[in-house]
C-alpha cells in the first residue's frame, strides 16, 4: 500500500513538474513570437469590440463584407488623420532632440558638480597643456553612443510598427467579415447544448464588456489629453498637442502609464524652462488632473460592472509589458476582461474570478470567517 501511494505521489509530482516546464516554455515562446502573435491578438480584441457594430449593420441589410469594410474605414478615418496631424510636431521635436539632449546634459553636469561621487573627471594640475587635457567622461561617451543607437532603434521600430499595423488592419477586416461564420462553426463543434450556451454567452459578454471599456476609457483618456494639451499650452510648453496625444495614449496603461507621463513631462520641463517652478509645473499639472480622473471621474463613469481588482490589473500590465513591451501593456486590461468573462462560466475557475473582480462589497472580517462553521458537503443522490 505504501509503495502504491509513493508511486502515485511520484507520478503526480512529475506531472506537475512537466506542466511547469511546459508553462515556462510557452511563456518564452510567446515572448519570442511577438512579431507574429501581437498583430493577431490585437486584431482579435478589436474584433470582439467592433463585431456588435457589424452585426447591427447586418440586421439592417448590409452584407458582412461591406459592413466590415465600413467599420475598418471608419476606424482608419478617425485615427490616421489624427496621426498625420501629430506628425509635424513629432518631426519638430525630433529635429530639436540634439539641442534638447545638450540642455539635459548641461543640467546633469550642474547636478553632478554638486555631488562629489558623480563629478566629471578633472585633469591633473602642474603639467603641460597637452598632458593636462581632461580625460574622457564615461557618462558623456555613453550618452553619445546611446543617442546614435537610439536613432537606429527608432527607425527600425517605426518600420516594424508600420508592418504590424498594416497586418493588424488586414486581419481585422477578415475577422470582422467572417465573425458570424467562425463563431457558428465553433459553437457547432461543441457537443453539449449547455456548453454551447456557455460559450456563446461568454463571447457575447466579452464583446459587450471590452467594447464598453474601450469606449468609456477612450472618452475619459481623450478628455484628459485635451485638458492636458490646453494646460501645457497655457504653461508655454512646446508642442502641447503632441503631449496631449501622448498623455491620452499612455493613460490606457494603468499605473505604469501615468508614471511614465510624469517622468516625460519632468524631462520636458527641464529641457524647456529654466526656473524651478516652470520645470515642475507640467508634471504637477498632470498629477492633479490624473488624481481627479482616477479618484472621482473614472469610478463614477466606469462603475462596478467594469471594475477589476487593482492587483490583478497591475500584475497583468507587468506581465504583458514584460512580454511585448508597450503593445502588451496596452492590451493587458482587455485580456483581463476577456479572462474574467471565461471565469464566470467555468466552475473550475470561480476562485480565479474572485481575485479578478473588483471589490463590490465589504469583505467579512477574518475573525468572523474563523468562527463560521465549515459548509457540509452535499449528500450524493443515487437513483
Image: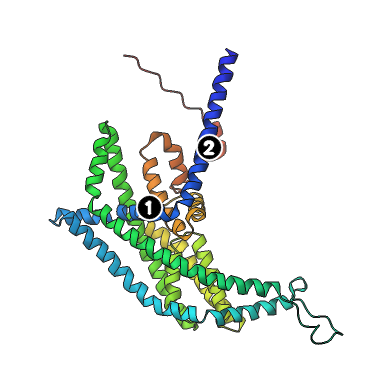
Q: Is residue 161 visible?
A: yes
Pick whichever, 104 or 367, lies toward us: 104
For the point 30% across and 45% down, the residue is 203
In what quadrant of the picture does the N terminus appear?
top right
Residue 67 falls left or right of residue 9:
left
For the point 45% across and 46% down, the residue is 356
Residue 23 falls left or right of residue 64:
right
Residue 247: image tag:
none
In what quadrant of the picture does the C terminus appear?
top left
For the point 77% across and 83% down, the residue is 133
Q: Position of residue 77 (x, y in %)?
A: 28, 69
For the point 26% across and 65% down, the residue is 74
Mark 1 burial class by Cα count in 10 Å: few <14, some 14-19, many 20+: some
Assess whether mark 1 and mark 2 are in contact (beta carbons under 8 angstroms): no
Residue 41: image tag:
1
Pick whichever, 370 or 348, lies toward us: 348
Q: Position of residue 146 (x, y in %)?
A: 59, 70
Q: On screen, 17 above or below 26? A: above
Q: Position of residue 325 (x, y in %)?
A: 49, 58
Amino acid at each position: 500500500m505504501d509503495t502504491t501511494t509513493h508511486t502515485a505521489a511520484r507520478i503526480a509530482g512529475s506531472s506537475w513538474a512537466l506542466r511547469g516546464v511546459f508553462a515556462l516554455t510557452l511563456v518564452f515562446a510567446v515572448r519570442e513570437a511577438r512579431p507574429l502573435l501581437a498583430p493577431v491578438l490585437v486584431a482579435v480584441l478589436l474584433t470582439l469590440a467592433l463585431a456588435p457594430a457589424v452585426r447591427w449593420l447586418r440586421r439592417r441589410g448590409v452584407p458582412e463584407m461591406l459592413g466590415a469594410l465600413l467599420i475598418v474605414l471608419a476606424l482608419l478615418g478617425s485615427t490616421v488623420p489624427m496621426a498625420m496631424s501629430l506628425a509635424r510636431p513629432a518631426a519638430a521635436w525630433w529635429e530639436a532632440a540634439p539641442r534638447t539632449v545638450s540642455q539635459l546634459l548641461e543640467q546633469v553636469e550642474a547636478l553632478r558638480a554638486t555631488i562629489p561621487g558623480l563629478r566629471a573627471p578633472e585633469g591633473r594640475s602642474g603639467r603641460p597643456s597637452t598632458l593636462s587635457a581632461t580625460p574622457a567622461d564615461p557618462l558623456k561617451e555613453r550618452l553619445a553612443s546611446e543617442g546614435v543607437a537610439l536613432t537606429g532603434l527608432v527607425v527600425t521600430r517605426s518600420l516594424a510598427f508600420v508592418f504590424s499595423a498594416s497586418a493588424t488592419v488586414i486581419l481585422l477586416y477578415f475577422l470582422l467579415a467572417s465573425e458570424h461564420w467562425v463563431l457558428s462553426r465553433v459553437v457547432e463543434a461543441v457537443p453539449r447544448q449547455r456548453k454551447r450556451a456557455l460559450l456563446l454567452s461568454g463571447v457575447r459578454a466579452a464583446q459587450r464588456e471590452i467594447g464598453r471599456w474601450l469606449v468609456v476609457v477612450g472618452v475619459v483618456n481623450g478628455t484628459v489629453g485635451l485638458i492636458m494639451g490646453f494646460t501645457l499650452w497655457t504653461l508655454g510648453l512646446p508642442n502641447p498637442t503632441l503631449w496631449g496625444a501622448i498623455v491620452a495614449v499612455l493613460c490606457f496603461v494603468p499605473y505604469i502609464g501615468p508614471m511614465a507621463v510624469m517622468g516625460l513631462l519632468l524631462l520636458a520641463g527641464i529641457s524647456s524652462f529654466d526656473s524651478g517652478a516652470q520645470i515642475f509645473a507640467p508634471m504637477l499639472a498632470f498629477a492633479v488632473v490624473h488624481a481627479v480622473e482616477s479618484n472621482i471621474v473614472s469610478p463614477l463613469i466606469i462603475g462596478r460592472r467594469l471594475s477589476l481588482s487593482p492587483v490583478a490589473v497591475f500584475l497583468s500590465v507587468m506581465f504583458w509589458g514584460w512580454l511585448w513591451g508597450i503593445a502588451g501593456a496596452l492590451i493587458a486590461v482587455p485580456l483581463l476582461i476577456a479572462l474574467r468573462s471565461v471565469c464566470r462560466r467555468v466552475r473550475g475557475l470561480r476562485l480565479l474570478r474572485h481575485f479578478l473582480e473588483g471589490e463590490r462589497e465589504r469583505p467579512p472580517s477574518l475573525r468572523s470567517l474563523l468562527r463560521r462553521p465549515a459548509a457540509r458537503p452535499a449528500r450524493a443522490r443515487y437513483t
